[in-house]
Amino acid sequence: MERTAAATAPLNGAGADYEITVHFAGGLVGCADWEHFDIVTDAELSPLYLINCQDDPSIGFIGADPTVFKPDFCLQLSPEDEEQLGYPEFSDLLVLAIITPASSLGSAAEPTTSATINLLGPLVINLKRGIGRQVIQSEYTAHHSVGG
């Protein structure tokens, strides 16, 4: 049975300086070698998070709570997801969706003026255990506009 809940637990309170190292067993979708990440936020970054890959220091992402850009975003976890995450309470979860800046999208002939956020494959992190999983949410898109 799937559980549905609103997305994100705060990291030590809103705007707090925070860093956690997270292990994603099996890596991210399409990137099996990327298993270990540092996730960082502070008052200056809020509501954004830096997601830095320890396995390949040239890899890094910007993430955000998906509900910042899609207030009705609802996370669904399958029983397998819950098992891989250690059967967490939803209050122990941090859910981050990766943002793609506008400059990374489109082409010179057809530039994209709005950044997008990947709601299709958010990162779900059990803060108590330091483990995470990229969870496919098939009802969403990988290119949800973050602009107006």
Image (cartoon, rainbow, N blue to C red):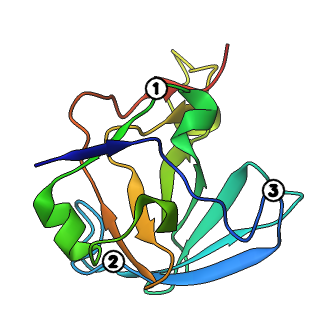
Q: Nearer the viewer, residue 125 or 118?
A: 125
Alpha-carbon distance for marks 3 and 1? 21 Å
Using the image, determine if residue 48 lies above or below residue 24.
above
Alpha-carbon distance for marks 2 and 3? 23 Å
Tell me the residue at 48%/46% (across/down): 7
Discs 3, 1 touching: Cβ within 8 Å: no
Discs 2, 1 touching: Cβ within 8 Å: no
The C terminus, quarter of image: top right
- What amino acid is at disc 3? Leu
- Read off the residue under disc 1: 144
Alpha-carbon distance for marks 2 and 1? 24 Å
Counting residues from the start of the chain, the first of labels 2 and 3 encountered is 2
- What amino acid is at disc 2? Phe
Tell me the residue at 46%/26% (across/down): 144
Q: Quadrant of residue 28?
A: bottom left
- Read off the residue under disc 3: 45
Q: Which mark is residue 24?
A: 2
State left or right for residue 108 relative to residue 73: right
Q: Quadrant of residue 133?
A: bottom left
Q: Position of residue 17 (x, y in %)?
A: 82, 73
Q: Position of residue 146 (x, y in %)?
A: 60, 26
Extreme residue toward the right, this view: 44
Dot 3 crowding, Cα within 10 Å, few <14, some 14–19, many 20+: some
State left or right for residue 52 relative to residue 17: left
